[in-house]
Image (cartoon, rainbow, N blue to C red):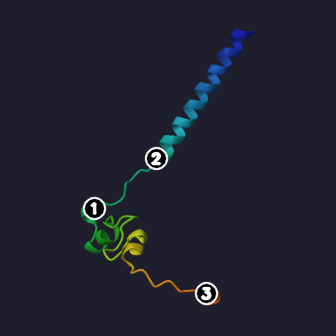
Amino acid sequence: MRGPLRGLTRATLAALLLVFAAAGAIAAPKEKGPAWASLTADQQQVLAPHEKRMFDVPPSYVPPAERRQRTTPSKTKQNTRYVLPAPL
């Protein structure tokens, strides 16, 4: 009983493999589209990769830590609510 069941399993797996291989061949794209040289200058400019990257920052950007160091320390506001009495 084990022999025929093993053969059936192999046949089923082979059939599934054939189905998936055929589906992949059918779904493959036939054309890759127009060649780059056949596009107009405007199309090439629109489709060209951008030089700007995700983390590029403008030259005027200053990191927060450096900004804190650049700021002049402000005069601390004195609390006038609690005044100590004059010494005796």
Dot 1: few (<14), some (14–19), or many (≥20) neighbours within 10 Å? few
Q: Which residue is mark 2?
A: 28
The quarter in which the N terminus is drawn is top right
Q: Nearer the viewer, mark 2 or mark 3?
A: 3
At 51% across and 41% down in the image, what residue appears? Answer: 24
Q: Residue furthest front?
A: 88
Q: Is residue 50 above or below residue 83?
A: above
Q: Is residue 19 above or below residue 69?
A: above
Q: Amino acid at mark 3?
A: Leu
Question: In terms of secondary structure, where does tag 3 sit?
Answer: loop
Q: Which residue is mark 3?
A: 88
Q: Percent from the top left, x then y, of residue 55?
A: 39, 64
Q: Quote the CA–CA distance across marks 1 and 3.
A: 92 Å
Q: Quote the CA–CA distance across marks 2 and 3.
A: 97 Å
Observer-nearest of 45 and 39: 45
Is tag 2's residue or tag 3's residue first in the polypeptide sequence?
2
At 29% across and 75% down in the image, what residue appears? Answer: 42
At 70% across and 12% down in the image, what residue appears? Answer: 4
**Do the residues under discs 1 and 2 have CB atoms within 8 angstroms?**
no
Dot 3: few (<14), some (14–19), or many (≥20) neighbours within 10 Å? few
Q: Which residue is mark 1?
A: 36
Dot 2: few (<14), some (14–19), or many (≥20) neighbours within 10 Å? few
Q: Amino acid at mark 1?
A: Trp
Q: Nearer the viewer, mark 1 or mark 2?
A: 1
